[in-house]
Every structure is written in C-alpha cells, then in structure tokens.
Image (cartoon, rainbow, N blue to C red):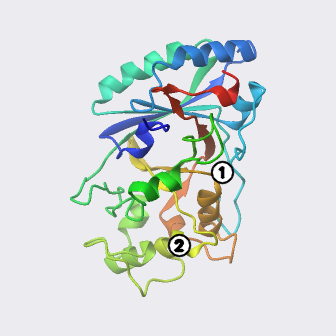
Amino acid sequence: MKKYQPGIFESVPAVARYVMFSLAADAGGAEAIRQALTRLSPLANGSDVVLGLGPSLVAALGATVPGLHEFPELSGHGVKVPSTPGTLWCWVRGDDLGDLLHLTRKVQKALAPAFVVRHVVDAFRHALGESGHGRDLTGYEDGTENPSGSAAEEAAFVQGQGPGMDGSSFVAVQQWAHDLDAFEALGDDERDHSIGRRRSDNEELEDSPTSAHVKRTAQEDFDPPAFMLRRSMPWMMSMQAGLMFVAFGRSLYAFEAQMKRMAGQEDGVVDAMFSISRPVNGAYFWCPPLKDGKLDLRQLGL
C-alpha cells in the first residue's frame, strides 16, 4: 500500500476546490486543534480531500516538520511575488461541483469551531487532450514537463526520513490571475516565444528568448535538478480567471529555485509569464503520509 495521499499522484480531476482555513480567534489551543484534525481525518482520505498543514499550524501543535517553512518574499526586478502564509489547506477533488460543495461543508463542520474558512477557489480541468494533460486558459498545455512513474514518485514524495515523514509531500500553492486582454493582444509568434512552445503542436522552440517561460523553468537546468510534480488547474470567478499553480515536491527546493529564476532573482531576467499574468498569493504546506489508508499524523504527535 502506498504511503502517500493518492490524489497527489493521480491526474487532476474534472473539478476541484482549493479551500484555505485559518485558526479561529478563539480556537482554544493545541487540544482543540488536535480534536478538529481527528474529526477531519475520515474525510481527508487523500483522494477526495488532499490535506496540507502550514508551518504556523505545525508550530501551534508544538511539532516540527524538517524542511517546512513559510513562503519567501521574492518581489523585485519590477514584479511582485506575494507571500501569504496559510494555516490549513484542502484540495477537494471530484467530478461534480455540487458534490464538492457538500463535501466542503462537511470538512468545514469537522474543523469548526477551531478553524474558519478564509479563502475558496473553484477550479476545473480545461481542454483535456490525448496527452492526458489539460490546458491553461491561454491554450497552452499544462504539465508537459511533469515526471512520470517512479520518477514522479521520487520528485514528489519524501523518502528515507523514517515513519511519519516517508510518503509525505511539500506543496507550493500559488494563485495566478491572467491578463487575457494583454495575452490576446499578442500575435501568435509573440505568444509562442513568451511561453517557449508552439501552442498548435506543443513543440519547444529552440530560438525563444531567455525570458521564455520554458527556458526560465527548465527543471534539468538547475543544480541540483529541480523536478517537481505539477497539479495546476485553471480557475475563474465572474470575469476574472487564471491558474491555480500547485506543485508537489519531496522538499520545497524545486519550486523555490524555479520561482526565484522566474522572478529574476538569479540574473535579473524576468519570466515573460509576468507580462500576461501575476501571482496574487503564495503559501507552503506539508501533506502528511498515509498509514493503513488513513492520515499518518505521528509527526505532529497525533
């Protein structure tokens, strides 16, 4: 039996909700938090509900998770990369938004009164192709460079750190808001060279500029290589839309290395993605492993 939450490894679902919780002002201390997590455990099976805990929540329980820290502030070079630390994160997954609403309410009630909902984003899979990958709302395939099979497991999950840690995963969650007017104002060649791929056939362009997104984030170009497992999904609310960027890793190194390069922290070259989209939040979480099909929270003393 696999030790990791299976929804992390599975393909993105048809629809999903990203639900952020905060501790209530009168949460009641560590014991109330433990009781809430115990109530949540049967719902957070790692498939319908993938669970992540933020650094502040781990600290509130008097525990530590090696390698877990808050999302860094990476603004500069003319771009903003906000850090918006989170307490508890649930990725609610399925095929029907109505069912997800009811499941979200069950999660909310299980966590009350210690936790309150802070932010919810509804997301969906768009334009699923023969490759098995969906597309971003710009029309470009998302997840092309994802590792697969055993390489994906190696990239996404902790190994060799012992019971309570092995099978766990670190996740970066970052909501991007697209400027679709700016994107649509570009010609086809400009769009392709901004991304570094042809939208028509997904082929990588060798002559794209250094600022092309594909070149900024080429996982094998980092030292050590920065492989991670992306599970991003488009979102929309009224006429606003974008991408919920979600990346799982055995540590936070891969995401952080790529984000620093995108933001121009390495060489002053900013990823062209910032000309058509911007991150509006960003947080890190730790996703516990499973034991006998249930959340293994021993690292937290539960």
Dot 1 corresponds to which residue? 82
All told, the count of numbered labels is: 2
> Helix, strand or loop at disc 2?
helix
Question: Residue drawn at (68%, 76%), measured in percent from left and top?
Answer: 268
Pointer 2 or 1: first along the chain: 1
- Viewed as shown, does residue 247 lie left or right of 285? left
Q: Nearer the viewer, residue 114 or 6?
A: 6
- The residue identified by callout 2 is 220
Work out how far the residue at label 2 is from the one at label 1, CA to CA, in angstroms: 26 Å
Amino acid bearing label 1:
Pro
User: Between 122 and 56, which is closer to the camera in this rendering?
Assistant: 56
Compared to 30, does 143 lie above or below? below
Q: Quadrant of the N terminus?
A: top left
Q: Is residue 182 visible in the rendered structure shown here?
A: yes
The quarter of the picture where residue 106 lies is top left
Q: Residues within 10 Å of mark 2 (few under 14, many from 20)?
A: few
Q: Residues within 10 Å of mark 1 (few under 14, many from 20)?
A: some
Quadrant of the image occupied by residue 179: bottom left
Q: Residue at x 54, y 65 (%)?
A: 274
Q: Position of residue 265 (x, y in %)?
A: 70, 69
Q: Secondary structure at mark 1?
A: loop
- Which residue sits furthest right? 62
Q: How far from the left and from the top, in percent, is residue 68?
A: 70, 44
Q: Nearer the viewer, residue 270 or 164?
A: 164
